[in-house]
Image (cartoon, helix red, strand yellow):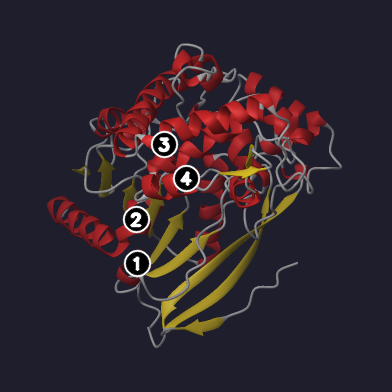
Amino acid sequence: MLHAQAFIQEGVQYRPHSFTVPLDYSDASKGELTIFAREMSLVGDNADKPWLVFFQGGPGFPAMRPLGNSGWAKRALQEYRVLLLDQRGTGNSSVISHQTLATLSPEQQADYLSHFRADNIVRDAEFIREQFGVEQWAILGQSFGGFCSLTYLSMFPQSLLRSYITGGVPSILRHPDDVYNATFKRTMDKNKAFFAQFPAAQELCQKIANHLIENDVTLPNGQRFTVEQFQQIGINFGMSDSFIATYYQLENALVEIDGQATLRYEFLNAMLAEQAFQTNPLYAILHESIYCQGFASNWSAHRVRGEHDEFNYQSGKPFYFTGEMVFPWMFDQYTCLQPLKQAAELLAAKSDWTQLYDPAQLANNKVPVSCAVYADDMFVEMDFSRETLAMVPNAKAWITNEYEHNGLRADGEHILDKLIAMGNQTAATLI
C-alpha cells in the first residue's frame, strides 16, 4: 500500500507515482511487483522539459529522499524534470527483506531474487517511460546506477537522450575475480593511507580485534560481533572525509571497568548502524551477480581474499579493514541475513545468468554518454572503466582525483554541470 503524498519543498514540487509491473517480463504467470518513483519539478514549470531518471547506487538501496533544492538535483531541475526511481526490491518498490521473503522456501527465494538485477530494473524504467508517453529521456547513474545505465544503453538505446554516469562505469566483459583482485588492492591502498594519517589507530584496531577474539561481544540486537564484521566498516574508506570519522569512532571504542577493558555501548551501537546488510539484504545477496553473465560467481570475493592473506587478521599481525566485498560467512553471522543463507548459496552457484551488456550494440552507440571517473575509486577500478569506455563511441570521461566514490553526493551540482556540458558538446558533433 502506497502512503506517499505530493508536497512542495523549497520551490520544488514532489509527486509520487506507482506502477504495477511483471516480476518476470518473459513470464507473466510469475506475479507482479509494485514500482515506486518520485517526480521532482520546479513549481510553475511547464511540461515541456525532458525527463531525467536517476538510478541509485547499490545494488539494493532506494533512490535518495531529497531534503531540499540542492546538490545535483538543483542543477538537474534547471533543464529536466527528475524521476527518482526506487529500483525493484528497494524503498517503496516491493521491498526485499528477511520479513518479506520469510514465507518462501530457499529455492523460491533464489528464483524470486534472480529477477532483481540491472536488466529488469531497466525494463521497469522502460515500462514507466511508455506509461508516461515519453519518446526519450535522459538517465543519471551513480555507482551501480552507472552499471544500469550501460545495460540501458545495451537494451533500449533508442529511448535515451543522454546518459550521465558518476563513479559507475563497469567492465562489461571481465569476471568478478578480476574486479575483486583490483578492489582488494585499492582497499589496501586506502588502509595504508588511513594508518599513515592516524598511526595510533593501528594499535587501537588490534586492541579491538583481540578483544573480539578473546570475548563473546554482542551488538545491541543480540548478534555476536566479530573481527570480520569490524573489518567491514572499511567500506567507508571509499567515501570522502571517512578517515577522520573512522578515527573518532576508534578512539572512543574502549572503556575500562574494574580494571578490565571493554567495548563501549556507544561504539557497539555505531557498529550495528554500519551494518546496512541487515536492512538492505539485496546488497549482500546480489552483489556479486551484478558482474555475472553466463557464469557463476562462486563467492568470488571470498576466494580472492584467500590470495590476500593480510586481510585475514591474526593476533600480533597488522590489522586491515576490508571494503565493499561480500562473503559467505555473512549469512551465518548477520541476524537478518541468516534466513537467506541457502538462497545465497544457490545464487552464488547459479551459472545461467543472462547477459547484462551487449558489446555489439555499445560499439555502435549514438547516445551522448558523459562520465565522471574517479582515479582513486575504491569500488570501481579506473582502468576497467577506461577499458569499457574505449569500446563505446560518443562516450567521454572526465577522469579526476578531486573526488572519492561519493562525489555526486559531495559536490553534485558541480559534477552534473560538467557532465551536462560534456554531453551537449558530444551531441553537437552528432548533428
Residue 168 at what x, y percent from top left?
37, 42
Residue 295 at what x, y percent from top left?
55, 18
> Pointer 3: what residue?
201
Viewer-nearest residue: 164 or 209: 209
How far apart marks 4 and 3 lie (CA) works out to 8 Å
How far apart marks 4 and 2 lie (CA) works out to 30 Å
> Pointer 1: what residue?
71
Q: Inspect the image, locate mark 1, and give the three-letter code of the amino acid beneath it.
A: Gly
Q: Inspect the image, locate mark 4, and give the three-letter code of the amino acid beneath it.
A: Glu
How far apart marks 3 and 2 lie (CA) works out to 29 Å
Q: Is residue 392 left or right of residue 327?
A: left
* The N terminus, quarter of image: bottom right
Q: Nearer the viewer, mark 1 or mark 3?
A: 3
Q: Nearer the viewer, mark 4 or mark 2?
A: 4
Q: Is residue 167 left or right of residue 418?
A: right
Q: Are marks 1 and 2 in contact (CB under 8 Å)?
A: yes
> Pointer 2: what residue?
408
Residue 232 at what x, y percent from top left?
53, 35
- Which mark is first along the chain, 4 or 1? 1
| Disc number for residue 114 | none
Q: Inspect the image, locate mark 2, and give the three-letter code of the amino acid beneath it.
A: Leu
- Residue 355 visible in the current orientation: no
